[in-house]
Image (spheres, rainbow, N blue to C red):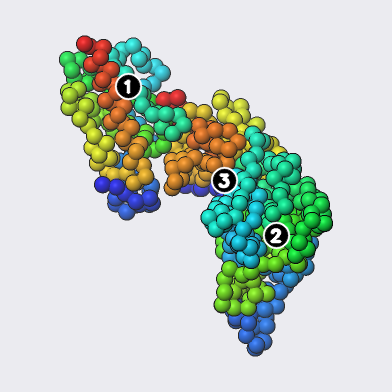
Amino acid sequence: MTTNDVMDLKGEGWLYSSIVEDHFFAPRNVMKDTLDPKDYNAYGEVGARACGDIMKIWLKIENDKIVDFKWKTFGCASAIASTSILSEMATGMNVDDAYNISASDIVEALGGLPKRKIHCSILGDQGLRSAIDNYRTTKS
Amino acid sequence: MKRIYLDYASTTPVDKRVFEAMKPYFSDDFENASALYSGAQKTKQAIENSRAATAKFLNCSSDEVVFTSGGTESDNLAIFGSLKTFKKGHIITTIIEHPAVLEPLKELEKRGFDVTYLKPGKSGIITVKQVKDALRSDTLLVSIMYANNEIGTIQPIKEISKVIRNFKNSQLAIRNSQLDIYPLFHTDACQATGYLNMNVVDLGVDLLTLNGSKIYAPKGVGVLFIKQGIKISPLMLGGEQEMGLRAGTENVSSIVGLSKALSIISKKDYIHEKKLQDYLISKLLKINNIRLNGSIKRLPNNINISVEGIEGESLVLYLDRKGIEIATGSACSSKSLEPSRIITAISNEEIAHSSLRITIGRFTTRAELDIFLKEFKDSVYKLREMSAL
């Protein structure tokens, strides 16, 4: 599901859906300076500065279950909203299930993204998998 | 919510005085200027008066002024029109030109022309020596913008035209005399019009593009100055308007609006905007990790900065939510997903992704800039807090 460049799904005049707008302007689960990365037992990172998107993800995993998900993202509105909504989707999930979250799951949860912005959400699922891989490596 | 418009380089609002001058030519004096009856003579007169006023502004004669539909058409006419009779040849331009120049040149490249793209240094300014070194015996056209649309930097047009003139003189003995007028020198002066010396004799240009929608005239009207003796073929066929160079019933109201807009331009705007520019730059550079893109030798309306750690589109949208309208060179904001070619050329892609263009104008106030600064700092704080950089 994608929206076109100037309208959201409801036909309102915004570049992104209202869900994207909500997560972009009021992002959930941001890794703030007041938090300590040491409290998290998994870390993942994707993206490149020259491409314009970088995502960092910290997870607290207990008994293979994601109990806390914090992130930082450099990027446009859809990159920020994708990470924010992903943090809500993945929290409470078993790592194996979370590993299967796909880019299209994120796009769907966001109520669609403009076509040319889909790659931003692809970054989100990659970032999460990178963190889970990190967890599995350190666990074994 | 009151909007604060800080994107004047994109387009300007129509000045109320301009709108007043245009009004009679919609429903009252509307006749087709090509007709014989006296009503039509009135519209014809309005066009010719506008042409004379425009010529006076440019210090040229009336028959050197062609009205077009805007900057893009003027650039296309200058490039395709002046090279229509050639199958090949060399053209010099810069990589920081507007797409209205670059895309026609790419098309000519496909058709067999050879194009040299000059690249400015960090300053965003092309040197006279770069042009001098690029000139060749088969160079037919040099097209270099007067002031850049993204970073406002000013190119040394007068000095470049001198180099081209000297080169022409040196070629006279060896060249076919039919090529005496080449290379032609075109400048896109769309951004410069309201601020810089527009005397075409001083500048020494053969072709000059000017756009109404950047100078408080309406969108959809522009000018191409074509120096006497320059051979140009029309792009639009189907009428004898504009000395046969631009077919189509004249857009009388807009032509009148354009000449009115030119008559309003004054040094006062320059001084007003320069003061605000100095103020805003000094305030912005006090914020951590913000850099000015391009030389300070720029138009008084342009401020282009990069905000480290923040992607431009995000910042534009955060500010839009507060009613503030600015532009960015970030890839995410462009259809092509390529970051600004200009910022990338003078620095790198990372800096381009984080670039913002703030352009002020005749109606900008210091109070507006103070609101902008407050909201800007607030948005920068929020976005940096969630940034992975």
Of all residues, the one furthest to the bottom in this rendering is B37
Q: Which mark is residue B6?
A: 3
Q: Amino acid at mark 1?
A: Gly
In percent of width and height, residue B94 lies at 63, 46
Q: Which mark is residue B207?
A: 2
Q: Is residue B76 above or below residue B323?
A: below
Q: Which residue is at 50% across, 32% downward? A: B350
Q: Which residue is at 41% across, 37% downward? A: A76
Judging from the image, what secondary structure is the residue with disc 1 in? strand
Judging from the image, what secondary structure is the residue with disc 3 in? loop
Q: Which mark is residue A44?
A: 1
Q: Between label 2 and label 3, give the one nearer the viewer.
A: 2
Q: Quadrant of residue A47?
A: top left
Q: Quadrant of residue B47?
A: bottom right
Which corner quadrant holds the C terminus of chain B?
top left
Q: Nearer the viewer, residue B185 or B189?
A: B185
Are the residues flagged by discs 1 and 2 from a single subunit?
Answer: no
Residue B1 visible (yes or no): yes
Q: Between label 1 and label 2, give the one nearer the viewer.
A: 2
In percent of width and height, residue B267 lies at 75, 51
